[in-house]
Image (tube, rainbow, N blue to C red):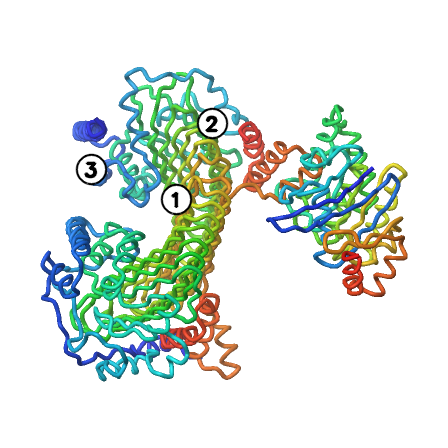
Amino acid sequence: MLLEKTKLLDQYFDEVLKEQQQIDLLLGDPVHPNLYSLRDMARQSFRSKGIPHSGMEDWKYTPVRAFVEKILRVKDGYPKYSSSAADALQLEKSCYIMVIIDGKWWPHLSDPILTDSLEIASLDQVSSETAKIAHLGAHADIEHPFAALNTALFSDGIMIRVKTGVLLEKPIYLVHISMGEINPMFYPRMLFVAEKHTKVTLIEKFVVSDTSIYTVNNSVSEVVVENGAEMEHYYIHTENELSVNLQYARVILDEGSKYSNYNFALPGSPFIRHDLHVSMRGTGAETTLYGMVLTSKKQLVDNHTCVDHSVPDCISNEHYKCIVKDQSTLVFNGKVIVHPDAQRTNSFQKNSNLLLSDDAVINTKPELEIYADDVKCSHGATMGQFDSEALFYLTSRGIRENTARQMLMEAFAAEIIEVVPDEMVKQYLKNIMAEHL
Amino acid sequence: MLTINNLHASIDGKEILRGLNLQVNPGEVHAIMGPNGSGKSTTASVLAGKPEYEITGGEIIFQGENLNGMAPENRAAEGIFLAFQYPVEIKGVSNINFLKTAVNEIRAYHGLEPMPAKEFLNRIKEKQELVQFSNDLAKRSLNEGFSGGEKKRNEIFQLAMLEPKLAILDETDSGLDIDALRIVAHGVNSLRSKDNAFIIITHYQRLLEYIEPDFVHVLYNGRIVKSGTKELALELEEKGYDWLKSESRDYITA
Amino acid sequence: MKDNNEVIDTLLDSSYEFGFSTDIETDVAPVGLDENTVRFISDQKDEPEWLLEWRLTAYHHFMKLAQKDMPGWQHFDMPDLDFQSMSYYAAPKSKPLLDSLDQVDPELLATFAKLGIPLTEQKMLAGVAVDVIFDSVSVTTTYKAKLKELGILFCSFGEAVQEYPELVRKYLGSVVPATDNIFAALNSAVCSDGSFVYIPKGVRCPMELSTYFRINAINTGQFERTLIIADEGSYVSYLEGCTAPQRDENQLHGAVVELIALKDAEIKYSTVQNWYPGDADGKGGIYNFVTKRGICKGSNAKISWTQVETGSAITWKYPSIILKGDYSTGEFYSVAVVKNKQMADTGTKIYHLGSHTKSRIISKGISAGVAQNTYRGLVHVGKNAKHTRNFTQCDSLLIGDKCGLHTYPYIESRNSTAQLEHEATTSRIGEDQIFYLNQRGIDNEKAVALIVNGYAMEVLKQLPMEFAVEAQKLLAISMEGSVG
């Protein structure tokens, strides 16, 4: 029975891949012809690896197959979610809102772009092909099974390009709505380019629509931050139990650029896997990765980050904090690679976890791979309950134990929320965090 | 107000208090002195209800109620305050938010509405002055990055805000320079009234020059071996604690 | 100050001090591995039927695993090991039944003297009981009689099979099952000799017990098996040292060590591993694939592993501790040094199963030349293990800009009362430090040795006194030619 089911999913992908291959042959590649051979390689790569399993080091704690498999049962009347998606628009003020449904950008639902400092377009309608040809498919690693699957199957996507020298004041806010309108599994593809000496804030939020079915979002983003540019990039996950998320992002940093990523996952989605791979390609680049993960019920949230220093004089800082409740599972894998000759690298990483239930599980692995000697690198991981001294101090002042725990939990989360530079986002996060703590 | 009868308490199976007796009445200031390891801090922790300590015998009666088994927050609400020897630092919890929560939870315990914001702020302002606690400190995370003196002043500031019936000062003088000591003592002295009481736990007589006790007790090996008035403190200062050891042996065997 | 690289190059030339081979006649099993090899070894050692059966089961499991891919998670490419081209048994020919040192082959004794093994009368006075494993066979165990008075059994594994079969049968494979991994399976099938220790209830072993291992014969693998049982309330400190001659081809060392600490017992196990690491071009050297694991079976038991790893072309080794008894404690202290083309992937696994169990991991990695050094460790807290604690500190010291140092700690917790803490840092020997020492009249080489020893001190001080001194010297020798 189990074997049969396993085969079914593999067959499913086999057919989907074949179908897409035929479409490509028929119509030519939808995005640009250079991608044709890349798609071929991606297809081969996915076929040779298949759906990741626990025997693969990067998937040791993450039984992804079970969550993807459910798409096969969607048609048998999987329950529909019926609450409202109004929450999706809470951030609308003073942002450029881009609505992306099942990976497809809907310009007529989005804010019009009235400035020529910015290009936002569907991948097949990009006017300046230069950036697209230079970057699309050039950075995502098709050795990653789901990056490969996306590369082989995506049919459309969005490109956002901030033109040289532009300091964009309004954040660009991408609302990813999972609906499963055509297919329960879809393959969003994003290309973000911050050209030289630009400044931009990107907020990506993941929600489901009120008519959503069970969906699997298998997305790939390629992010390029050119010389001297600065990017603030937010991920906010507030999906519900019908939405599974497989996110892969590769970030390329050129000389003197700055990239800060703030990754927030809140209770809801049964399964989130984030691969965030930042490559420092230009000297003097800086990256900061912050994460705040709160899991409950039977959620599984897995963050795999990789910061790779391939040139000298770059700085990376990472801090992920997680609060793990109920029967949920948290996986964190933070890798730092310092390549030969990446001298004078400074890299710091911290991972702090609160495990609040004996039915919950935390598996964490901070990794350092170092091939250069003149570096300052450290990582630390802690895991535990509330500090009993702190709890006693608070209760000895008359604060009830539940309140005290609440305060300590908020304090734990505050360390990440407080560093969020965008006031609007910070306030929003404080509010939704308070709801869940 | 407080009656401790033949109190025995232990931690990790090791007995620290071995038959402690103490009577504290409203309006009184008691000093408990004694050498290191005699059980001074244990006494403070046990009174405040620190969970690691186990009461293995005897009782603590506070305002007619047995404290044994009472949660620390309820003791606080009933009016017991412990000024910690080592106040903890809690990142991310602001001093103000912390105090507001404490004040209102204690009020809730007594069936009162939360304190109106304006009244609360006025009170903060008033009490801050008492210990020369700057606005800036009050806004920061609880004790985080505070100097030793600032932490102790924060303890007295909280004492002033919560207005307990019985305040226990656990080695509040340790690590304080003379100016900070004066500030702390001034705070305590101005909070003294006929309705409240203080237990001052200290190793040295120094603090007692500024806060005059009504009674001085010497704690040794988990019980009070000698009681007297403030002259006893001077005597201890002069002779140290060594002489006690032989004397207390007589006392115990007697 | 000399140019860094120049100094590194000259210093890297320093050679392996223990690389001589001894010309002793040996009994060698025919090259290759099949059921007959297993039977041959068992037969040579006059083993009981149950042990042969156990070996054969392990052999069949090994053959199954050998069909599959070799483990792939380690941070080096697994070498092609041709299990059919090596010999699985070599014994000095003139051997057997020796009661005193006088009967030991003088050439062998000369070898040991050269190795600085405390076999001499003088060292014996220092109170070290030594079991010497030469290639595959235990040649002598000193101090046996004296230990026996206390009820302590300390002998070769082969002897234990003959003399104390019930103890061996009860505990053999109980901590490292024959099916644990491919090298453990191989060891279980062909293990030749090793040491056996039993400390009876309430006895505190009055001296350090020690084993020296040496691979001498050409083209031979060494698969010794060590079994240490500390009965309730007992204590033992055990040390093993290893050396091998300098040979151009790689030799496989696939030992298994099992430790069993019952209620209130303590086992302290120290290793100074100095197998031949190969030459500067990576030619030759020992492949050290070792499975070491201990179990704190009863409450309040304690096991600590201390290792100083300077040798071997490849080290693949994770001395582990299963903390089953409540309130039991596990400790792992490690210094691993690699230079030239050496590769080490080493660390520990600690399984917290009992409540109130504690563990502590201190790992110091040092990498020079083009070597790769990896710490890989697991801290696992089971669902029912309440109030456990772990502290892990992994420090890395890089010497030169062509080596690599890596840290892969796996932390798994499923109990909310666990307090786990992991820290890792990376540093190098600063030019300012060297200069400071230079200025005080200390040359580069000594300065490096000094700094490295200071860096490793936290671990070295865990070793028994006299071995700590040896280990320090060894570290200094290993560091020769590493830096400027």
Query: Which residue bears the numbered disc 3?
Result: A47
Badge 3 sits on which subunit? A
Three-letter amino acid code at the position of disc 2: Ile
Quick check: C317 above or below A334? Answer: below
Q: Are marks 2 and 3 on the same chain?
A: yes
Query: Which residue bears the numbered disc 2?
Result: A97
Three-letter amino acid code at the position of disc 1: Val
- From mark 1 to mark 3, how far is it between C-alphas? 25 Å
- From mark 2 to mark 3, how far is it between C-alphas? 37 Å
Question: Residue C315's x, y, as percent?
Answer: 30, 62
A311 and C81: which is toward the camera: C81
Query: Which residue bears the numbered disc 1?
Result: A251
- From mark 1 to mark 2, how far is it between C-alphas? 22 Å
Question: Residue A184's x, y, as percent?
Answer: 31, 23
Of labels 1 and 3, earlier in sequence is 3
Q: Are marks 1 and 3 on the same chain?
A: yes
Question: Residue A49's x, y, as percent?
Answer: 23, 40
Considering the numbered disc 3 on the image, is that residue within a helix, a strand or a loop?
A: helix
Of labels 1 and 2, earlier in sequence is 2
Three-letter amino acid code at the position of disc 3: Arg
Considering the numbered disc 2 on the image, is that residue within a helix, a strand or a loop?
A: strand
Graded by Cα atoms within 10 Å as few (under 14), some (14 to 19) or many (20 or more), the crowding at tag 1 reads: many
Q: Is residue C392 left or right of residue C343?
A: right
Of labels 2 and 3, earlier in sequence is 3
